[in-house]
Structures are given as structure tokens and as C-alpha cells.
Image: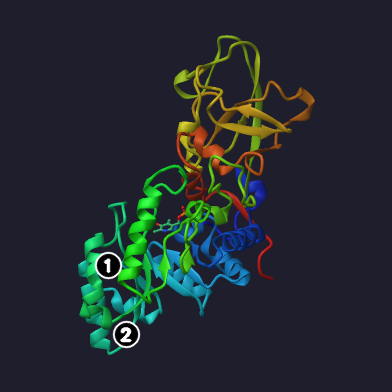
Amino acid sequence: MQGPQSGLIPDAEAGAVLTIDLDAIADNWRILRERAGTDTAAVVKADAYGTGIEKTVPALLQAGCRVFFVAHLSEAKRVRAVVTEATIYVLNGFPRGTASTYANHDIRPVLGSQEEIEEWAAFCRAQGARLPAAIHVDTGMHRLGLPIVEGLALADDPRCKDFEPALLMSHLVSAEEPENQINARQIAAFTALRNALPGIPGSLANSSGTFLKDMPCFELARPGYALYGGNPTPHLTNPMSPVVNLEGRIIQLRYAHEGETAGYNATWTAPGRRRLATISVGYADGYPRAAGSTNTNVGEAGIAIVAGKYCSFVGRVSMDLIIIDVTDVPEDEIRRGDKVTLVGPDLTVDEVGRRAGTIGYEILTSLGRRYARHYRGGPR
Ligand SMILES: *Cc1c(COP(=O)(O)O)cnc(C)c1O
């Protein structure tokens, strides 16, 4: 999802203003590299988790990052268009017949099946060049990657001489749960693989993996979410700097009297006289409809910060609008046109996600295309 570039939509013409702090992304990369104690890549799939590949990748490059992971070849080409030197891996492997596109753009596939290894090896033989690729072995996700036995068998596989196995990787299932036994099982399985395939740099840790106690980060850490300010340690204070700020605009203020309802299907009824503010952000902007409230869940549903106070969403989130209860804000402190914070240092993407029954990852990657978008900091 490619967002509009900075300044394309004027603030006054947008329902909300999204600000992305590129210096905070760079700081977060340095924090993660420090924590990992090894070479550290950046996962920039899904338009750099909604923050914008074209702005975020140069900021990461300036911070020192030299390895980037995306999900699709189309994303890899966007990364290559802004960085000439860096290494780029495509996590989702490579669609049949696209090997030459990888080679032409100096992009590396992540090979996760016998078919992919076969096709890449055959392409390299035909080219007479040992082109680099990563090998993905499945240690528990059952989503992508070779089964462990097939990974171990690569030790005697002549096809691995046809190309350059440049990285051996696997992916953690529940790294954000430090007590989960699966972490140790995956680390053990991956360590056994490394021993069977010596000399190939290894990569296992995502953002949360980097913060696991006793986690070996091998030769390359592979964080995504934490770069963008998401909390890699959900049960502890967030060690990352906030990156995303989203401010919606109040377009109307009104009163609802006891017994009157707000929004579609009248899911919320005013328990007394309430002052309501309508803001011009909705699910068409990627704000989850599931953040709407009824009278019974209004405490756990979506919130906004209005003049320094947390205010609840009332009723459903509409396509383009959200209604918030601003009764607790002194009447003369808000008026039409004022900004309310929907995401910021005191209302994190993790909390926004939780209040919508989802995770911060989905909040970031859904950030709307109608916002006026600004970037702070970054390479000059
Ligand atoms: C998305 C992804 C990552 C990054 O994970 P985060 O939790 O965002 O740090 C790393 N590796 C793979 C294979 C991924 O798909």
C-alpha cells in the first residue's frame, strides 16, 4: 500500500495528519543492533509497515543498515530503486519464472521449498553464475520453509554448489512470549541446522526474538515491528522510540441527552447528558471498525486524547467518522477544527490494536492513504 508522499494532501484538506519520525526509526535500528550484538537487517515489507519504503529505507541506510527484507518482488524493486548498494531479500520466495528479474535487480530470493531450490539452481547453472539466495527452514511455523529433515539433507545436496547459500534463516512462532517453550525448541533446531550446514550466516531473531533472554542472534538479526515503535516486549515497558503520530480533526461538537443513541445501529445510549465530538477518521482510513463501543464495553473500546484527556469512542466506527465522548473535557477547551490524538507517544499502536481486538502490526500496516502525511528528520 503506497501512501501519498509528504505534502501531497494539504493538512487542511485531510481528515487527519500522520507524522512519521524517521530519526526515531534510525534510533530504533541502533537500539536493536546494540541489543542483538550482531549485524542487523531491517524488515521493510508492507511499505515499511505502513511508514513508506521510499522515506524509511534511506533513513535506515544512513543509520548503517545494509540488509533489507521485503515480502514481494515488487517491494524489493522499490527498495532497490532507493538503495544501490544494500542486500535485499524477498521473504516470500520467488514466483515461477521470475529468477531473471531477481538477478537483473540484484535481489535475492529466500528459498523455502525443493521447487524453489531447483528453479534457482537451474537458473544459476544456465547463467554460469553462483547467485546468492537465502534458505528458509521451518522450525515450527508450518508456513514457509523446508521441513527440518530436508534442511539437514542440504548438507550433501549438489544443487547448493550451483548457487551461493548466503543466509540460513528460520522464523520464531511466539517470540513475544518469553515463557513459551517453543522458543528454546526452535533455537535448538536452528542450532542443529547450522552445525549441519557450516559456513552459512544464520538469522533467526525478529523484533521480539532480539529481546529474548539467552537468544543467540547468530550473524543477522531481522527486526521489523520494533523499528516502527511497536513494543517487542509486550509485558514490559516499550524500549523503542515512538515513530507514528496520528491526529484527527474535530468537525462537529454536540450534546446527546439521556436515552439518546450515537452512530449506526444505535449500539451506545447516552447514560445522561454527554458532549460528543465527531472526528473525520474512519475504517476507510484503516482505523478498525472493531474499535467501536457499546454501553458494556465502552471502557475497553477505542480512545482518543482530547486536550490531554483520554476520551472513549461511542457507538460504531463509521467509514469516515468516529464519535467520541468529550464530556470530561472543559467545554471551552475544545472547538471545531481542534486536533485529537489517535496514535502518539501516550496512545501507542500496541494499545490502539488491543482496543480494536487486534495487534499494533495491523494498525501500522493499515495506516490510511487519505491522511496528510509528514516526515520528520531523516537524511538531508
Ligand atoms: C515479518 C517478518 C519478520 C519481522 O518480524 P517482526 O515481528 O515485525 O520483527 C522477520 N522474519 C520474517 C520471516 C517475517 O515474515
Answer with left or right where residue 345 lies relative to residue 316.
right
Where is residue 29? Give x, y as percent: 59, 62
Furthest-bottom residue in view?
128
Report if residue 119 is visible in the image: no
Q: Give amino acid for label 1.
A: Pro
Query: How far is disc 1 from disc 2 in space, using C-alphas?
Result: 20 Å
Where is residue 21? Give x, y as percent: 65, 56
Residue shown at the point (60%, 9%) measured from the top left: 258
What is the secondary structure assignment of the residue under circle 1? loop
- Quarter of the rendered image showing ligand 1: bottom left
Residue located beneath label 2 in the image: 130
How many C-alpha atoms fall within 10 Å of the one at disc 1: few (<14), some, or many (≥20)? few
Placement of 106 over or under 368, stated as above or below: below
Answer with left or right where residue 71 lies relative to residue 241.
left
Residue located beneath label 1 in the image: 95
Q: Can you tell which of label 1 and label 2 is closer to the viewer?
A: 2
Report if residue 133 is visible in the image: yes
Where is residue 203? Give x, y as percent: 42, 65
